[in-house]
Image: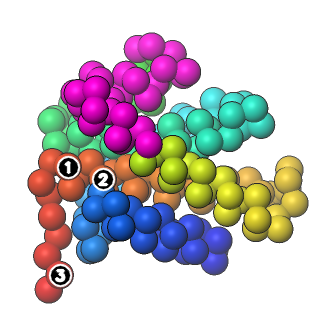
Amino acid sequence: MDFEKNLRTDLQQYLLTEKCIDKKAPVCTDVEEYWNKIAEEYMADGIREFNSYPTVSLGWMMFIGMAMAKYWDADWSQYSQSSNLYADIRDKRGYDNMDDYILQEVLCLDKAQAEATGRIVGECAQRSYSMLCHSRIAAGTPEAFKAYVACLHQLYLMGMSMQLKNMDYHMSLT
C-alpha cells in the first residue's frame, strides 16, 4: 500500500532528524511478529477513541511499540506468553493513562525524558493523522480502515525502533 510506505518514509525522516532512531531500521523479529496480536487486541479501543481523540488513538500504539521492545529486552519469553498483553498494559491505569504508565513504569523515564518522548510521539501521531486526512480516502470505507491499521502498524514499528535505540541496540550499515 503506497499510503503505508509514504507514512513510513515521513515518520522515519522526522525521527532521524530528531535523532530518535538509527538510519538502518532495527530487526526485532519477536516484536514485529507480535504486531498482529497487539493490533487485534487494541482495535476495539483504538477505533472507539478515534473520532473524538484521533491522535491519542494513533499515538498510544507508538507507546505500545516502545513497551513491547522493553519487554523483549527484559524477558520476552515471559511477556509474550500473556493471553492479552495489551489489556495487561491498559488495565494498569486505564486507556486514558496508558501513556503515563508506559513512560513511568515500563520505560522508567524521568519527567524530562517522559515529556520529550511524549512530544515526539505526539508529533508522529499528528503527522499520521494529517496523512490520513489528506489521503482522499473516504471515511468509513474499507480503504479508510486499512489506512488506519497502516498508521497503527508504522507507529508500533517506530515506537519499537525508538526504544531499541534508547536501549543501545544499533544496526550496522554493512
The N terminus: image quadrant: bottom right
Q: Position of residue 168 (x, y in %)?
A: 12, 54
Q: Residues within 10 Å of mark 2 (few under 14, many from 20)?
A: many
Q: Does 26 sit left or right of 15 as displayed?
A: left
The quarter of the displayed image where residue 22 is located: bottom left
Q: Earlier in the sequence, mark 2 or mark 3?
A: 2
The span picked out in magenta is: 92-119
Circle 2 SS class? helix
| Amino acid identity at mark 3 | Leu
- Nearest the camera: 54 or 153? 54
Residue 137 lies, in percent from the top left, at 82, 64
1 or 3: mark nearer the eye: 1
Report the Cα–Cα distance between label 2 and label 3: 17 Å
Percent of width and height locating residue 88: 40, 21
Overall secondary structure of the magenta stretch?
Answer: helix
Residue at image coords 35%, 41%: 116
Residue at the disc numbered 1:
166
Q: Dot 3 lies on which element?
A: loop
Is residue 138 something one can see in this rendering? yes
CB contact under 8 Å: marks 1 and 2: yes
Which residue is label 2 attached to? 162
